[in-house]
Image (spheres, rainbow, N blue to C red):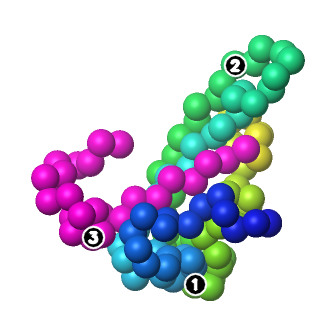
Amino acid sequence: MTGEEFVPHSYGMQIETLGDAWYHDARLWMACAYGKREGLKTIRECWYRKDLDLETLICTRGRDFPLAMLATRLRCPRCGSRQIRVVWNFPTLDKRNSAAAGPKGRG
Ligand SMILES: [Zn+2]
């Protein structure tokens, strides 16, 4: 656990826990990364993707749960892989940074 994999440094502020992310009205989804790093055999990539509900996560994990650990607790329901990427979106901070963004984002 290095903590280097996910910290949204680019926003210039520390958002380390689910509670922090909730405060900033964050959206998130998970994406299965299965199939990307098997060097020898060719396997089909899974590409499962699912929007996650931050509020529900806080109810189950608690406000102080570190964002960096979230991916390690998730599993792909389609292929069972633990290679899960968690993608965060901070609409309120994005608005500040890029006023020209569309209303529905780029997905
Ligand atoms: Zn999968």
Judged from the image, the secondary structure of the residue bearing numbered disc 3 is: helix
x, y percentage for residue 4?
67, 63
Can you identify the residue that label 1 sits on?
A: 63
Q: Earlier in the sequence, mark 2 or mark 1?
A: 2
Residue 44 got which mark?
2
Instruction: Please tell me the numbered disc located at residue 2.
Output: none
Instruction: Pick the residue in front: 35 or 15.
Output: 15
Look at the image and tell me in which quarter the N terminus lies: bottom right
- Judging by the rendered image, the residue that carries numbered circle 3 is 92
Q: Position of residue 63 (x, y in %)?
A: 58, 84
Residue type at numbered disc 3 = Thr
Could you say where residue 17 lies in the image, as x and y percent from the top left? Answer: 57, 79
Q: Residue at left 67%, top 47%?
A: 84
Element on which disc 1 rests: loop
Q: Are marks 2 and 1 in contact (CB under 8 Å)?
A: no
Q: Residues within 10 Å of mark 1 (few under 14, many from 20)?
A: some
The disc, 3 or 2, on the residue closer to the chain's N-terminal end is 2
For image coordinates 72% across by 49% down, the residue present is 75
Work out whether residue 77 or residue 6 is closer to the camera in this orientation and state it: 6
**What is the CA distance from the residue labelled 2 to the residue labelled 1?**
36 Å
Res 66 quadrant in image: bottom right
How much space separates mark 3 and mark 2, taking CA atoms? 36 Å
Magenta-tinted stretch: 83-107
